[in-house]
Image (cartoon, rainbow, N blue to C red):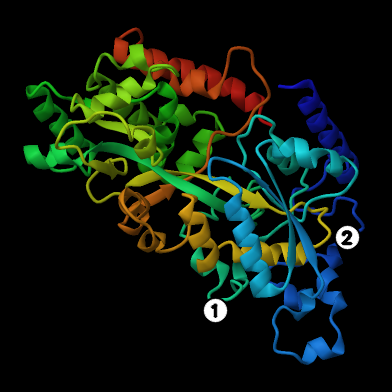
Amino acid sequence: MKKKFLCTILSVSMMASMLAGCGSDPGTKDSGNDTSDEETTTDNETPEDTGTDDADTKTDDEAETDDPYAAYAGTTINVAAIETAYGSEMWQKVAEAFTAETGVEVELTTDKNLEDVIGPSMQGGEYPDFIHLATGREAGLTEQFIKDTMILDVTDVLSMTVPGETAAVSDKIAEGFTDTSLTNPYGDGKTYLAPMFYSPCGLFYNAGLLKEKGWEVPTTWDEMWELGDKAKEEEIYLFTYPTAGYFDTFLYALMYSVGGPEFFDKATHYEEGIWETPEAKSCFDIIAKLASYTNPITPAQANDQDFTQNQQLVLDNKAIFMPNGTWIVGEMAEAPREDNFEWGMMALPAVKSGEDCYSYTWFEQSWIPSGAENQDAAKLFMAFLYSDTACEIFAKDGAIQPVVNIADKLEGDNVMFYSIYENGVKPAMGNFAAFDAIPGVEVRTVFLDPVNSLVSGDITEDDWIKDVISASDQMREKLK
């Protein structure tokens, strides 16, 4: 990490600690910016009802108007958004559409290194009103704001009406996206981060091969093993994977499948004894058996330089399934393939017939700093991001919002990929809890990388289980 970059983050952290105070309650949103609890919007209130900040400027004439946005007259909000592969033009178009609908002006800041751009001003107590910056980035700025409880509770946004529409925000967002640790980080039943652009992850395959052979798509793991035996007779392996790191989304969905959200939460927080339960044993057994059905060349190519060669195995009908995300289509767009090739995607099979199937969902987040000056107007902007207008603008650049029936507005393979949750499949979301550094112990090295050794036969399932239990005990002691 650049020295300047690190200094920025450390400064933000020091400032956050001074403002938030020692041992602050996760539910406490006041960060010392002269905004009292009485002045912030409470749960289930829309900005029009709060009487705060922007609403205080309402005049008698405005009170008599039918304009639902009169309270925001003359308001300008500062929006900061990370620039990714989707580009920045879509944010400008959405901002213009928001202004046209509500009259609220937007000062937009986008940058590939957004942390460097907004960090210095935040050190001085000047915060953007709205930030689109996901967790999981190297700088960890969003995680730092979560840790210091400097992110505004936006639960009330869910009950707001989407600007320009009659539906509530909660009616627009697909089921499950606001019930995850990625949006509700404190476990207090409140939402602090809004779910944004998402990509379903699952098992990708050549649908043309299955059609040609007359093979059914397996819906349970028993059916998966039966298909593996049929394929083996024709010298086709059941499985491959780009790198062992791709087993993160696979393992998350599998944990949901064997034990539901409760088991997932306990496992990802390293609860004592969790890896010795029947649910955990089911996870280990499935992955170990899948290793025996995996193309043996996979581990040698499972690295950052050669991973596309493993993906090519699916295109060449040398393996049927691989864990991946919707980006695989673009990533392999120019790769050669069999004449019968046709992209297919499925959720992880159910453990038993009739049980739930899960597909892991990777998604970004947006949030409002608790020190933002125009919090109500920022909430209005957040609500607008789920409007049909905004969703269509984002989708043109490939950024798909997690809204109901989004597949109806898509084209090509994306229609199939993004309709997966409309066909009975449940979304799996969340990840392993962060812990303080432990020499030689990382989530990937403990839970994911050993898959390579399982395939090659260098370790046994029991060896892996023992290592997971040992490392999990250390992780639990170092939980942040």
Q: Which residue shows up at 47% across the image and 55% down it?
A: 395
Depth check: give the residue in front, 307 or 474. Answer: 307
Quadrant (top left, top right, bottom left, bottom right) of the N terminus: top right
Amino acid carrying label 2: it is Thr
Is 395 situated above or below 460? Answer: below
Disc 1 and disc 2: Cα gap in Å? 31 Å
Label 1 vs 2, first from the N-terminus: 2
Residue 58, can we see it?
yes
Side of 54 relative to 270 (left or right): right
Image coordinates of residue 371 in percent, x first then y, are: 83, 53
Disc 1, SS: loop
Q: Name the residue under label 2.
A: 35
Image coordinates of residue 167 in percent, x first then y, are: 53, 75
- Of discs 1 and 2, which sits in the foreground? 1
Amino acid carrying label 1: it is Thr
Image coordinates of residue 122 in percent, x first then y, are: 84, 43
Side of 170 relative to 344 (left or right): right
On the image, which quarter does residue 38 sit in?
A: bottom right
Depth check: give the residue in front, 148 or 361. Answer: 361
Depth check: give the residue in front, 172 or 115. Answer: 115
Side of 382 relative to 391 (left or right): right
